[in-house]
Amino acid sequence: DTGVSQDPRHKITKRGQNVTFRCDPISEHNRLYWYRQTLGQGPEFLTYFQNEAQLEKSRLLSDRFSAERPKGSFSTLEIQRTEQGDSAMYLCASSLAGWWEGPGEQFFGPGTRLTVL
Amino acid sequence: AQSVTQLGSHVSVSEGALVLLRCNYSSSVPPYLFWYVQYPNQGLQLLLKYTTGATLVKGINGFEAEFKKSETSFHLTKPSAHMSDAAEYFCAVSPRNQGGKLIFGQGTELSVKP
């Protein structure tokens, strides 16, 4: 397995356009997370899935943001009507949740850097 | 709401010196605790974690951290810094029974001088 992959790695768009990012997790992982990281800050949690169910959304995730994981495998994050404040690195991570104590280790992808002009 | 504070956005040490990166969390219930490292142009990588049991945990590359409940701290240490340790380090907590989501600190950039 090659780890978590994200596509595209870079995206430049104009304000008001819609963008979609894709994340392919490690194949046997049942949990998938999205985070956003701005320059000089730590990643901020956006949302997560257990299999295909979206179980939590952060208040950071406005109604312009939507995420899906249709078959419990890859996930997409769409931002509608982008704003300059959406410029950030969008990170995806996956983990295997089980019966053991504590959450499984999250493996992070390389991220998608979004620039909104 | 839980939060994580990393003291010092930038730490500089000499090669061979002790590395100490500080992390404090605020939570009424001790969360799970993590340290991640991010090298330039690379993804986040787990250094070590505390979930239960022994409060001194050892991670990769010679790093270790100690969970101190009374001080709500999880400081990261390494006895002797190498040039290759230069990177951004993030402390994170995962609240119990909340699906494993991570709440990160703002990060500490470690520089190592020859």
Image (spheres, coloured by chain):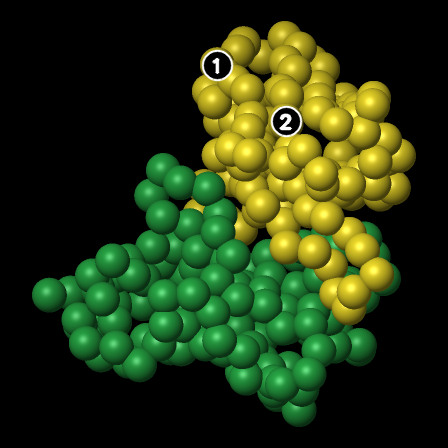
Chain colours: A yellow, B green
**Residue B20 horizontal/vertical position (percent):** 37, 77
SS for callout 2: strand
SS for callout 1: strand
Which residue in the rendered view is the most extreme toward the bottom? B70
**Residue B6 horizontal/vertical position (percent):** 50, 68
**Residue B13 horizontal/vertical position (percent):** 23, 72
Q: Depth check: A16 or B42 in front?
A: B42
Residue at 56%, 26% (x, y): give it.
Answer: A6
Q: Which residue is mark 2?
A: A23
Q: Depth check: B66 or B10 in front?
A: B66
Q: How many marks?
A: 2
**In this view, B34 is above or below A64:** below
Q: Is residue A49 left or right of residue B102?
A: right
* Amino acid at dot 1: Ile
**In this view, B101 is above or below B27:** above
Q: Of tags 2 and 1, which is closer to the observer?
A: 2
Q: Which residue is mark 1?
A: A12
Whole-number angstrom distance, CA of label 2 to CA of label 1:
18 Å
Give the mark nearest the N terminus, 2 or 1: 1
**Residue A53 horizontal/vertical position (percent):** 88, 34
Q: Depth check: B62 or A80 in front?
A: B62
Q: Is residue A105 left or right of residue A110?
A: right
**In this view, B114 is above or below B79:** above
Residue contact at pointers 2 and 1, CB within 8 angstroms: no
Residue at 35%, 76% (x, y): give it.
Answer: B78
Residue at 42%, 50% (x, y): give it.
Answer: B38
Visible residue check, residue A95: yes
Q: Give the image quarter of residue B82.
A: bottom left
